[in-house]
Amino acid sequence: MNEQKKLRSSIDRVRKAPTEIFTLSQKKESGVYIYNHQGTISGVMLAVEQYENLLDREKQHTTEYGEYEQLEDLHNQICQIIQLGTIIPAKKLDDQLTTLGFLSKKSTESTYEYTPILNELNNKGKVIYQLKQKQKQHIICAEIIGKQSTHSTSADRLLVKKIHMKKIKEKNCLYT
């Protein structure tokens, strides 16, 4: 609190010209508050560099928020197509996610092409799908958490418990 009082000073009490106060504030990398007669802030004086830095910060925050919204929208699309708590064939899961732009997990090498999906699910407890399109050096992944269904007559079905979206820097990605 005392530091704030030290930093605050009015031109009346200091008896300096406004340009001197502004020059001093630039050296200390701070702004100048302009108060009206009622004692409320009526304006702020900033150097051009300070103003540009504020604009850059706001732009970066807006961009990050926009990317978060895109991730949330993609998550909602997946949840509309693949209902949580339902049993779904591995083929349908793979087909639905590839229509949304994810890379297919089916194999062309094995006799049954969806075996890799079930193997990953049994080994890790989840199947990780990677979005084909990268966003600003980030990879978007959808983690389908579940288990192989034992209630179904077909062995290729899985129970979807949760769906998580992850945005990972490309150099840190384990899923490529």
Image (spheres, rainbow, N blue to C red):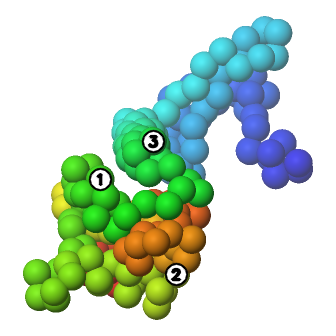
User: Count the marks: how many?
Assistant: 3
Say if 154 sits above or below 10 in the image.
Answer: below
Q: CA distance from mark 2 to mark 1?
A: 20 Å
The disc, 2 or 1, on the residue closer to the chain's N-terminal end is 1
Q: Which mark is residue 96?
A: 1
Q: Give the x, y percent position of residue 145.
A: 52, 70
Q: At x 88% / y 48%, what residue is drawn?
A: 1
Query: Residue 80 shows which numbered tag?
Result: 3
Q: Earlier in the sequence, mark 3 or mark 1?
A: 3
Q: Nearer the viewer, residue 13 or 87?
A: 87
User: Mark 2 — residue?
Assistant: 125
CA gap between label 2 and label 3 equals 22 Å
| Amino acid type, label 2 | Gly
Question: Is disc 1 placed on a helix, strand or loop?
Answer: helix
Answer with mark 2 or mark 3, whichever residue precedes in sequence. 3
Relative to 27, 138 lies left or right: left
Q: Are marks 2 and 1 in contact (CB under 8 Å)?
A: no
Task: Count residues near mark 2 (Cα–Cα under 10 Å), then give few for <14, some for 14-19, many for 20+.
Answer: some
Name the one closer to the observer, 98 or 112: 112
Q: Position of residue 67 (x, y in %)?
A: 38, 47
CA separation in Å, label 3 and label 1: 11 Å
Q: Residue 172's spot in the image, x, y percent? A: 35, 81
Horizontal arrangement in the rendering, residue 43 relative to residue 106 (left or right): right
